[in-house]
Image: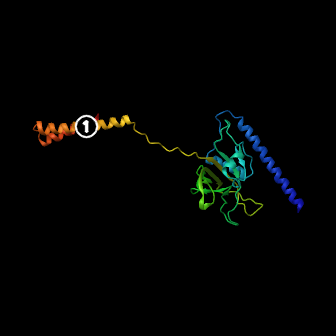
Amino acid sequence: MSINKSAAMEEDGNQELMVRMKEAEDEAYLKSMPSGFRFKPRDDELIFYLMCKARNKPLPPTRIKEVPLYKYDPDTLTAISGNMSSSGTINEWYFFTSRDRKHPQGKRPNRAAGDGFWKAVNSDKHVKSNGKLIGLKKTLVYCRGKPSKAQKTNWIMHEYVLSDPPQTTHKNDHQLDGWALCRVYNRKPQAPKVPEKSSPQNFGSNNLNIQNQIKEQSALQNFVTEDLNFSESDKFLLYANFGTIIYSL
């Protein structure tokens, strides 16, 4: 038994080494790209990468790291990832990850991660290619603390899974079938809009204009009613025309 266990550990170690070597080669290739080239795949393109991963097919150079995502909070996860754009600016992070079951024999994934958990904010969105369903996309937000007193953060994750994943055999019953591909980014809070304040000069000017209009209307009324003998219809037309002139200024 000890020999078999030692051989299994050695095999896992070799696989881990091969994964890291492949990631290092991909990163070197992507960093050699000219400025302006970015890894910014669409939803259906991410599903394509996920299909290759799930079926053990070779992947083109990407920035998708293979990590146990749900073991870390997003700050730690992105800090140890180190995948940067060719210009050196970190925009978003991509990960292949396996998922554990929340309950034995259950089908729901365990969303606990680090000092909090990932909470789904909407239902699954269908990802299609040429009208055919190929995957599902779920949006989640990271919450710190326990569910009863959790606080939402600005960390957002899009989790992609295949709509028809290949059947695989796992070493433990706690792992869900298939791989997931996750895109993680930090949504910066928007600065509150500050209402424009009228300057004291403009405020006084507006008040003066209103006062002048009131005086002019009062003078017109006295002029019509006292100095001239206009009919009621003539008064109405005169007031209306005068008001139009005032409000068109």
Left or right: 142 as drawn, with respect to 9: left
Whether residue 138 is visible, yes or no, is no
In front here: 77 or 121?
A: 77
Secondary structure state at the residue bearing disc 1: helix
Quarter residue 243 falls in: top left
Give percent across and percent down for residue 189: 56, 46
Quarter residue 162 falls in: bottom right
In the rendered image, the residue lying farthest to the bottom is 105
Give percent across and percent down for residue 176: 70, 60
In the rendered image, the residue lying farthest to the right is 3
The quadrant of the picture occupied by the N terminus is bottom right
Query: Label 1 sits on what residue type?
Result: Gln
Give percent across and percent down for residue 147: 61, 61
What residue is disc 1 on?
A: 213
**What residue is rendered at 65% in x and 56% in y?**
116
Categorize mark 1 by other alpha carbons within 10 Å: few (<14), some (14-19), many (20+). some
**What residue is rendered at 65% in x and 54% in y?**
161
Whether residue 77 is visible, yes or no, is yes
Give percent across and percent down for residue 99: 70, 57
Left or right: 213 as drawn, with respect to 120: left
- 120 versus 24 height, above or below: below
Left or right: 14 as drawn, with respect to 138: right
Which scheme is used to colour this image of the protein? Answer: rainbow
The quadrant of the picture occupied by the C terminus is top left
- 2 versus 187 height, above or below: below
**What residue is rendered at 17% in x and 41% in y?**
236
In front here: 71 or 23?
A: 71
